[in-house]
Structures are given as C-alpha cells and as structure tokens.
Image (tube, rainbow, N blue to C red):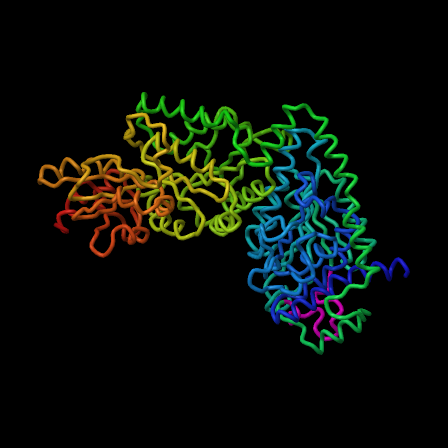
Amino acid sequence: MTNSAHANAMANAIRSLSMDAVEKANSGHPGLPMGCADIATVLFTKVMKFDPKAPWWPDRDRFVLSAGHGSMLLYASLYLLGYEDMTIDQIKQFRQLNAKTAGHPEYHFADGIETTTGPLGQGLGNAVGMAIAEAKLAAEFGADLVDHHTWVLAGDGCLMEGISQEAISLAGHLKLHKLVVIWDNNNITIDGAVSNADSTDQIARFKAVGWRTVEIDGHDQAQIERALNEAKTSDRPTLIAARTTIGFGAPNKAGTHGVHGSPLGAEELAAAKQKLGITYPAFEIPAETLNAWRAAGGRSANARSGWEARLAAASAERRAEFERRLKGDLSPAFAPAVAAFKQKLVADKPKVATRKASQMALEVINGALPETIGGSADLTGSNLTNTSQTVPFTAADRSGRYLRYGIREHEMAAAMNGIALHKGLIPYGGTFLVFTDYARPAIRLSALMGQRVVYVMTHDSIGLGEDGPTHQPVEHLSALRAIPNLLVLRPADAVETLECWQIALEHKDGPSILALSRQNLPALRTENVDENLCAKGAYVIAGDEDADALIFATGSEVAIAIDSLKLLAERGISGRVVSVPSLELFARQDRDYRNAVIGSPKAKVAIEAGIAMSWGALLGDTGRFVGMSNFGASAPAEALYEHFGITAKGIVEAVAAQL
C-alpha cells in the first residue's frame, strides 16, 4: 500500500465507522466526521501526545471537539486508537440509552472525552481555560512535569457564537501559545451556506486579537501535518483554517447541508463507500488499518514513561503537592485555618456586606490553598475577589493567581470549566448576580459535568440600590436553583459566608453559586460552633422551639426575620427563624432533621428579596411569601425594602393572615 493509500485508508476508517453508526442509530451528524477525518487522522496518529493505556496521564495533550455534534469523529478515533472502554459495541450503540457514545460527547462517559460539548462555542471557551491551567501549573511545577498543548476542532457555528469572540480575544491577550484551534471551514450550517447568514472574515478577526493564522487544504494530510507541527512552535495561539468538504465522499450530499445532521440513507451510504473505496462490511475495519491505528495510539508510551520517571525523581514534597492538587484533595491546612477564622469572626462580630465577608474569608482560604485561582469580569472592586495572594496571571507572568477576564462573563464561566476540567487548580470568578444571565450556558455545563467551580455573584438583590432594575436580580435565585447539581448558597453574615465558602471548596462534584450582598449586614452568628451549620442547608438561628410562626429567610433577609420576632411577641405570637443558606442542601437532609427544623407551626412565611418560585415545597398551599413579584427600582436600598414590603412588618402581616 502506498503512503497516500495508507493515509486514505486511515481516514476512511473514521468515515466508515461514522457513517455506519449514524445510519444504525437513524440519527446523528455524519457530515463533520467525513469532512474532518483527514485532520483527525493526522492529529491523533502523528502530532498529539497521549496514551490510551493511561488516558488521564496529567501531561497529555488535550483535545476538545467544540463542534460536539460531530461526536462520531471522536468516538471512532478513540476506538481505533485503542481506548479500552470505547469498544466496537459502543460504536454500534451510538445515541442509545446508557451508551458511552452519546449524541454529543459527555465528560465522565468515556476515557478521552475531555469536556462535554454540543452547545456551540463552549468547547472553545473551555479550551482557553485548559490552556490557562497548563501555563499556570507549568510556571508553578516546571516544564518537566507540565508541558502540553490544547487542540480544538471548531466549526462555523462555534465561531458565530458570541462566546467565541470573548474566548479568542482573551486567549490572544494572554498569548496562550499552546492553544491551537482547527477551524472546520466547510461553509455549511444547518440552514445552508454560511454566506446566508454571515460574511465575517474569520482570518482577519483572529489576527485582530493577536492570533497566528494559517490556511490549508483540510484534505491534504501533508499540509495538515506541517501546519499542526508549526503551530507547536508559535509564540501566539494559532488558528488553522482547514478548508474541508462536509460529508466528504458522499456523491450527492457532500458539500450540502443535507449531510450535516441526518443519516446518509442506505443508497447514499453505499455510493459513498464505493466512491471512497471502502469495501469492508459495516463496523469492520481491516486488520492492517486497525493495527496501524493501534500502533499510532501507543507512540507516546515512551514519553509517558519518561514523565513518570521525572515525577518519581522529584523531591518528595514537590511530588506530593503535585499529586494532591491533581486529585483535588484540599490541603490539611485548610480545615484548621477555617476553624480559627470562624472563632475570630464570632469574637469580632463584623458588620459587613457578605461580599466583603467573602473577601475576608478568601484571604484565609487563598493562604491555605495555593490551588485557588481567582478572577472577575471587570468588577474586582465590587466583587472583592482579590486578596493579598492574588497577583494577576498575565502574558508576561504565568505565576499569578488572578485572572482579569474583562467584560466577558460567558467566557469567564466557560474558562473556569476548562480550568477545573484540566485538574490541579480550583477556579472562582466574580460578577454581579444579575449577569449570570450572560454566563448561564456555561454554569449549566459546570453542573452537568460535575465540576468544582465557584461563582462569586455579588449585588444579589434590590439591596444594591440605586443602579436600579437593570442590575437588581429578582428571578435569578430561583432560576439558578432550577439547574440540577448546582448549589446556590446565600449567606446571612460573615460566619455563614465563611461556612458557605467551605462548602463550595469541599464540594468536589459540582459547582456553587455564592450570592452575596452589596449592603452591610449585622453579625448574627455570635457563638462559636465547630459544626458547619450551613452544610445542613437550613437551621434554626433564632426564636422559640415550639413556635406559632416559622419564618424561613436567606441572606440579607435573615436579619429582618429576626427583627420580626419582637413584633410578633408584642402580638402574643411566638416565632422561630430558620436561616436557609441552601435550599438544595436542606432538601438532601433526612426527614427527621427537616421535621425537627420545621416543626408544626400554625403559620409559615418565607422572606427573600427575589421571587417566590423556589419556596412552594416549604410553604405548602397556605404559607405566605414576602419578597418580589416584579422588577425593582432605582433608589437607596432602605427605601426599596420599605417600598416593596420586605420588612419585619411585612412578615408580621403574613403571619397574622394565617392565624
């Protein structure tokens, strides 16, 4: 077999498996795998550093299929390369229940899937975070332990999504030279030609934000190999614009939107295989071709062995710290530091905004945990996400622990996902709670992938005051609580804020939102308790044991609820206040604990400066809600609380209406 025939056979193995799997499922996207098979063949068999026998080797190159609809390209490649859990049976079960070969790649499902993609542009955003993590850890632990590239395959849709501009401009600004994006430049979207909706000069766009660019024929494997290897020597991130034909090989559908998201159909599939010279049966790859793929899969084994030897030769302290960080275990110094600071807060009783309490907690946390890497979407002075340890991470200094994300909330969230996925660092980043709207798709993916990402969301209610309804979150707490596997934490004072930070950092399997106030709040927790009370989600903070009225409250409204107890007592009504920093955590407690907290009151009230949507399960049919039912207004915070009836008097009226 000639070199050209061999190269074609290698690429056709991807095409054949992809066509067969989509046809069998009667669902899927054959166009991208057929069009990008040459790119994948060269990237995986000649350029990338990885080892299927050690799929989570820390110094492997990362591959992100940002155009996640083309998932069969990845699944076929993983099978051909010899990843143990990607069997031919999994390929045959493409898009079926409980298969590892989901419609779009899902993190945790199979080795070799670095992130969950499908919502276009998210993978590109993740990859920027992965490249940041690589650069930061290399600066910290040395290039002998951390020295790898991040490769992205992105389509026209990824580049049209707004997040792509946020991602590429940040990457260019930071000069993330180990980030390489391969653009599947096939000029086709679902609705037809790209020119129907877009006329952007993508090359000029990437150049404008500091990227190196190169244009190639995406079906010429020699050009592909040369471009990929040259990208590895660049001092800037690289865009490789690979001109391809979607559905390459399909005689009637190639180059059309008809091959994007539908099976070829039996007749077109047979004709495509004939045109490509594929003569073997469905789901069968000739031994010669499969063996060549498997051999290519093992070509980095020596590099991995060398890396393992370097790690073994490192000092015991350096090796232990590196391994701890990659496992995600917190330093033994963390818990004692938190306990000591809690004692100090109880003694000092600071009256501060919870955003300030968060910064105070972070000063302790960042001192105990070198793996935290903070940031803000251009609101550092408002979010208070910086501490004495957070020197900025820049193009000139990779040792920093603080990212200036700029006004890029969506990319901040996507990049933090990438940092978390990379392992070795714990990312946190801040903006205003109302701007979770800009970041929500990435927050949802944090939850879907179970990544430890901490979102520091300040200015959490009408309590931010004069900036008005455009900046005052009303529906946001409930909307965020609707996302599965996302902890929404809204602390009431400095002690609760510290406890919520502890919860977020100890929670390895999902993201957390810290909803923090702009306005100062009184100290409510004035006795030291070793237990993290917020970890229960809700607990009795004040009032009588067998009370007539039960008042649930969160964040800045807990103090209002406690103030209402005196007014209730004046009416001869006993009350109990339950602080509810996390509805999600409270729902996870056993029935006995929840019943002990709730008791058997005659009246139930929940108070929160948001909408009522979250509270139905606790209030039942007869309980009353004190909060918002519409947008806020521009005025000082005190005036707004009075105007909207979020007051101790409002609680008393809600209780009285039930008695």
In the visual, does 274 lie left or right of 89? right
- Magenta segment boundaries in residue numbering: 244-260
Residue 181 in sight in this render: yes
List the single residue furthest toward the left: 571
Between residue 154 and residue 302, name the one nearer to us.
Answer: 302
**In the rendered image of this protein, does residue 528 appear above or below residue 268?**
above
Q: How many discs mark residues in the rendered view?
A: 0
Q: Residue at x 70, y 44 (%)?
A: 54
**In the rendered image of this protein, does residue 414 appear above or below residue 380?**
below
Between residue 510 and residue 54, name the one nearer to us.
Answer: 54
Quadrant of res 105: bottom right
Give the x, y percent position of residue 209: 63, 44
For the N terminus, which image quadrant? Answer: bottom right
Give the x, y percent position of residue 351: 30, 27
Report the predominant secondary structure element of the magenta stretch: loop
Residue 121 in sight in this render: no
Q: Is residue 264 magenta?
A: no
